[in-house]
Amino acid sequence: MAVDPSSLSVRVYPDPVLRRRAEPVELSDEVRAVARRMLELMREEEGIGLAAPQVGLPWRLFVTHVPEGDGRSATDSPPTAESAPCVYLNPVISEPDGELKALEEGCLSLPRIRGSVLRPPRVTITATGLDGKVFTRAGAGLLARCWQHEQDHLDGVLIIDKMLAIYKLKNRGAIRDLEADWAESGRSR
């Protein structure tokens, strides 16, 4: 089944595609075109990351751009930002390091929902780029958090599954509203 990148849009909870585990993807011109469209959507939505399941594709692919600023730098060791947008095919996160830290996260697929999620402050990622080469990078701070958030999407996990209990309670009404909007639009689960 061919994918028309121009038809892609951000899927919103409780769309079932957000709960499916994504499958490995092979680099192709179609994958490159989808990745470019995902970068456009991420910018349009003012996000810092977007995973393929969020646009309805069951692929192990995500894009990120954690810009420099607010104390974030691409030259930190390990970096806490990226100097340019990046595409990650079949990413694997390893080497979590440091005491878990709770920070507030949001998600393009969960509009109006924010909550603190515990994550390690430093991780390593290994993935394939659009050039077909495998790369490994270490990241810290918001960059590491973004990678972990997007990796969760590839496994069908959302921030509402991981946020601290007080935020689950706080967002209960907004979650019910999203579920009601989904039901009213005639979509089935």
Image (cartoon, helix red, strand yellow):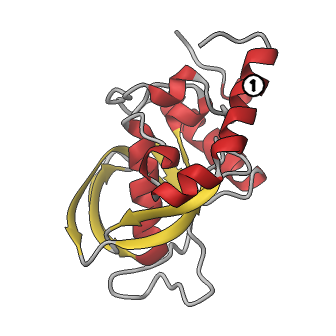
Vertical position of residue 138 compared to residue 108: above or below: below
Residue 20 lies left or right of residue 186; in this view the side is left
Residue ID at (56%, 69%): 66
Residue ID at (43%, 87%): 75
Mark 1 crowd level (few <14, some 14–19, many ≥20, 10 Å Cα):
few
Mark 1 element type: helix
Amino acid of disc 1: Ala
Give x and y (percent) for residue 180: 75, 25
Vertical position of residue 117 compared to residue 51: above or below: below
Vertical position of residue 132 compared to residue 119: above or below: above
Give x and y (percent) for residue 153: 45, 41
- Name the residue at the left extreme: 95
| Residue 29 appears in the figure | no
Q: Which residue is mark 1?
A: 180
Residue ID at (66%, 21%): 4
Give x and y (percent) for residue 167: 56, 57
Q: Nearer the viewer, residue 106 or 33?
A: 106
Residue ID at (39%, 68%): 144
| Residue 89 appears in the figure | yes
- Quarter of the image containing the C terminus? top right
Give x and y (percent) for residue 19: 46, 28
